[in-house]
């Protein structure tokens, strides 16, 4: 390779690097915010089980939770804590509420064994053996989530594990349904962990999904633009 070609490649490489840096400066995003966008698209689009379109979905009505099974005091305290954290992050009018009447609810949390849960939701029968926690949600024709359920296995999991599962499954039911191996401290970590707190990037994902400018039905390309706009101007 002669010197002129080497010089051209050097200039080309510098040009690409400068263009990338200029683009980040132009749109006003730092490296962390770019990572948030990447992680959002990994977690929010599609589901772990089944074949569904990889688009944004979220609740546009309150999530009204009825609790069944055998919850203990510590789990109910933990549920209240998670509820308050999510409600503080949502700014589009969404709110989680606990209700005492199942007829007024649109989301059911069951604390018990997988076998008991599968008796209520038979479609989950094939999944309970390998999952100590599960969730399922349903949405309307506009891609707004409007109902769902989850369970935490209190027979196989200890209290620390139960609290982790409660936070993970409930958070995924918001419309952040996929796991990822990227961040070990994240509640969406695909490997088994015992985290019972949201990592900063988890909070950002919840905040962005329940931002007034976030819409449902967005694919990867469209949601990228919306996320950049929110992070730049919010």
Image: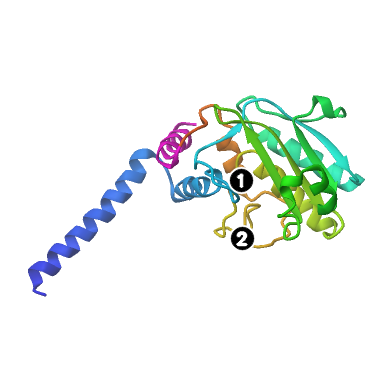
Which residue is depicted at the point 64% across and 57% down?
Answer: 185
Q: Quadrant of residue 156?
A: bottom right
Name the one closer to the observer, 43 or 7: 43
Of residues 19 and 99, the one nearer the viewer is 99
Q: As displayed, is residue 99 above or below residue 223? A: above
Residue 176 vs 3, above or below: the answer is above
Q: Residue at x 70, y 61 (%)?
A: 193
Outermost residue to the bottom? 1
Question: Which residues, given as a range, are shown in magenta?
Answer: 219-234
Where is residue 68 shown, x and y percent of the image? Answer: 86, 40
**Residue to which mark 1 is pinned:** 177
* Local crowd size for mark 2, using a 10 Å CA cut-off: few (<14), some (14–19), many (≥20): some
Disc 2 is placed on an element classified as: loop
Mark 2 or mark 1, earlier in chain: 1
Q: Which residue is mark 2?
A: 184
Label 2 and label 1: CA atoms lie apart by: 17 Å
In the image, residue 122 lies at what x, y percent? 76, 46
Q: What is the count of numbered marks?
A: 2
Q: Nearer the viewer, mark 2 or mark 1?
A: 1
Indicate whether residue 40 is drawn in magenta: no
């Amino acid at each position: 390779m002669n010197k002129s070609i080497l010089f051209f490649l050097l200039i080309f490489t510098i040009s690409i690097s400068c263009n990338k840096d200029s683009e980040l400066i132009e749109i006003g995003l730092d490296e962390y915010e770019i990572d948030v966008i990447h992680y959002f698209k990994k977690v929010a689009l599609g589901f772990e089980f089944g074949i569904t379109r990889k688009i944004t979905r979220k609740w546009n009505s309150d999530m009204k939770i009825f609790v069944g099974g055998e919850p203990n005091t510590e789990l109910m305290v933990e549920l209240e804590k998670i509820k308050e954290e999510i409600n503080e992050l949502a700014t589009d009018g969404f709110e989680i509420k606990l209700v005492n009447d199942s007829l007024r609810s649109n989301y059911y949390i069951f604390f018990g064994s997988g076998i008991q849960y599968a008796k209520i939701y038979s479609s989950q029968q094939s999944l309970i053996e390998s999952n100590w926690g599960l969730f399922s949600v349903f949405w309307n024709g506009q891609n707004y989530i409007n109902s769902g359920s989850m369970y935490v296995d209190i027979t196989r999991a200890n209290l620390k594990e139960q609290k982790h599962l409660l936070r993970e499954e409930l958070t995924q039911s918001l419309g952040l349904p996929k796991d990822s191996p990227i961040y070990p401290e994240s509640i969406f970590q695909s490997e088994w962990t015992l985290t019972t707190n949201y990592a900063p990037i988890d909070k950002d994902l919840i905040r962005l999904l329940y931002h007034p400018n976030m819409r449902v039905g967005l694919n990867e390309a469209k949601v990228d633009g919306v996320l950049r706009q929110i992070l730049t101007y919010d």
